[in-house]
Image: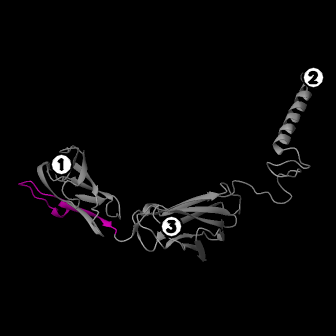
Amino acid sequence: MTATAAQGPVSPGMNTQFTVTILNQGPNPLSDIPLNEQSPFGANAASWTCTATNGAACPAPSGSGSIGAKIDLPSGGQLSYTISGTVPATMSGGNFQYTLSAGLPSGFNDPTPADNSASASVAVLSGNVLDLAISVATQPLEPALDEPVNYDFTVSNQGPGATASPAVTFTLPPGGSLVSVLFGDSWNCSTTNQMVTCNRSMPIAAGQTTHLRLIVAPPVGAKSLRIIATVAAGDGADKNLADNTVTWDVAIGGSTIYGTGGGLSCALGGRPGGSAPGGGVPWAALAGGLLALAGARARQRRRRTAPGQR
């Protein structure tokens, strides 16, 4: 038998899940195998499903309460049970453990009885339970070679608790550097070698979202920039660590920055959306007029060109 827990840690009142597998590795089919379940969910507090492989058959495809029953297994047959339920809201810390044991039918011996029982447990959080998460967006979408990258980290707290000491940490690649921190929203950052640590002086309450904005220079000549950022709280237990880290890769060199004297230029002055020099003519109207004039001249040239000439 084997047993696994689906997730962890969990907080009181959360759902959790266990999976147990029973396999007949012997050469003989077995009937009326008794199951002894030690469930932490309590009577009728859990639901379960059953799947069968290799010629076995589930007593029932699903049910609620205890799975304790007698089962039949052909040689090589296997049953897998998935048990789901809610951690009691009154539980404060510790391990939430599920155990299932299988007995032997009369007249049979098992040379390895130690694996006839299996347990799995999940840690239950206590104290200040919260759920921090981090995501990131970058600009520009296609930075040119050696162009700094703007990072906008979004840090959120789904609660139920608050944190007064949130921190975001990430490591710069060798040769990369932190250009600046767009101070605001109470974040302050420091760099030690290539490690950047950002602390927030204000709490993050349940349901609150905050932004941390940085500018990072990639290593000289690098074609990509990877940052792995992690958010954590020093005064609480996070019930979902899966969304506490984000890995973000930026491809570099997909666009071009034109320096002075190179690239495209425009001889007209003025402001986008404003008027052309001298005033009175909006840029949109001027651009439309120029396009119309170019089209008229092209049509005029086509009428003057003899067939077969260009």
Q: Which residues are magenta?
A: 100-125
* Alpha carbons under labels 3 and 1: distance apart: 49 Å
x, y percent for residue 309: 91, 26
First in sequence: mark 2 vs mark 3: 3
Q: Residue 75 shows which numbered tag?
A: 1
x, y percent for residue 153: 57, 62
x, y percent for residue 18: 28, 57
Q: Quadrant of residue 222?
A: bottom right
In terms of secondary structure, where does tag 1 sit? Answer: loop
In terms of secondary structure, where does tag 3 sit? Answer: strand
Q: Amino acid at mark 1?
A: Ser
* Alpha carbons under labels 2 and 3: distance apart: 71 Å
Residue under the image location 29 percent in, 59 percent down: 4
Residue under the image location 66 percent in, 62 percent down: 149
Q: Residue 230 shows which numbered tag?
A: 3
Tell me whether circle 2 and circle 3 mark residues in contact (CB < 8 Å). Answer: no
Q: Quadrant of residue 106?
A: bottom left
Tell me whether circle 2 and circle 1 mark residues in contact (CB < 8 Å). Answer: no
First in sequence: mark 3 vs mark 1: 1
Residue lying farthest to the front in this orientation: 280
Residue lying farthest to the top in this orientation: 307
Q: Residues within 10 Å of mark 2 (few under 14, many from 20)?
A: few
Residue of label 2: 306
In terms of secondary structure, where does tag 2 sit? Answer: loop
